[in-house]
Image: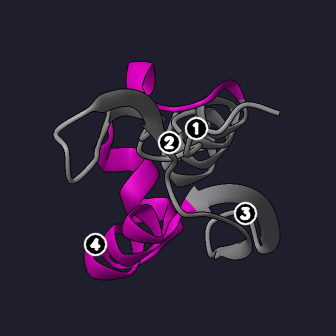
């Protein structure tokens, strides 16, 4: 399992450990990923995702999972999140066949 947030695409960063003697060695900074269950109001079910804590705060700020997925570009989302976005968009579009 890769260490990438499924909603924000936040991943691993690379930097240096710097000692007191100014010696530099490579190190990695990993995102704070959490397994969370988010509720989709449009689908009427809960969804398990691996999300960074920063991404979780962003989802709450926007107003929930459905709003976040609708407003986010698909290329930034994981494949599971892209599938959810398509399902939510399908549920939220009005039925045109009933009007005809």
Which residue is disc 2 drawn over? 99
User: In the rendering, at what x and y percent does residue 30 appear?
Assistant: 52, 47
Viewer-nearest of discs 2 and 3:
3
The residue positioned 39% from the left and 47% from the top of the image is: 70
Mark identifier at residue 43: 3
Say what secondary structure mark 1 lies in.
loop
Which mark sits nearer the N-terminus, 2 or 3? 3
Residue furthest to the front in view is 21
User: In the rendering, at what x and y percent does residue 78 appear?
Assistant: 60, 30
Which residue is disc 4 drawn over? 62
Say what secondary structure mark 3 lies in.
loop
Which residue is disc 1 drawn over? 4
Highlighted magenta segment, given as a residue range: 52-79
Spatial CA distance of label 4 from label 1 is 21 Å
Of helix, strand and loop, which mostly describes the magenta segment? helix
Is residue 9 visible to the viewer in this orientation of the structure? Answer: no
Left or right for 28, reference 80: left
Left or right for 86, reference 61: right
Spatial CA distance of label 2 from label 3 is 23 Å
Residue furthest to the top in view is 75
Mark identifier at residue 68: none
Say what secondary structure mark 4 lies in.
helix
User: In the rendering, at what x and y percent does residue 7 appear?
Assistant: 50, 47
Name the quadrant of the N terminus. Answer: top right
């Amino acid at each position: 399992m890769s260490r990438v947030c499924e909603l924000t695409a936040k991943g691993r960063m690379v930097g240096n450990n710097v000692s007191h003697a100014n010696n530099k060695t490579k190190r990695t900074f990993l995102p704070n990923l959490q397994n969370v269950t988010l509720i989709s109001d449009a689908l009427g079910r809960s969804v398990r995702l691996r999300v960074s804590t920063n991404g979780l705060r962003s989802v709450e700020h926007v107003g929930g999972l459905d709003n976040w997925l609708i407003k986010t570009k698909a290329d930034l989302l994981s494949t599971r999140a892209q599938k959810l976005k398509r399902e939510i968009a399908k549920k939220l579009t009005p039925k045109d066949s009933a009007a005809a």
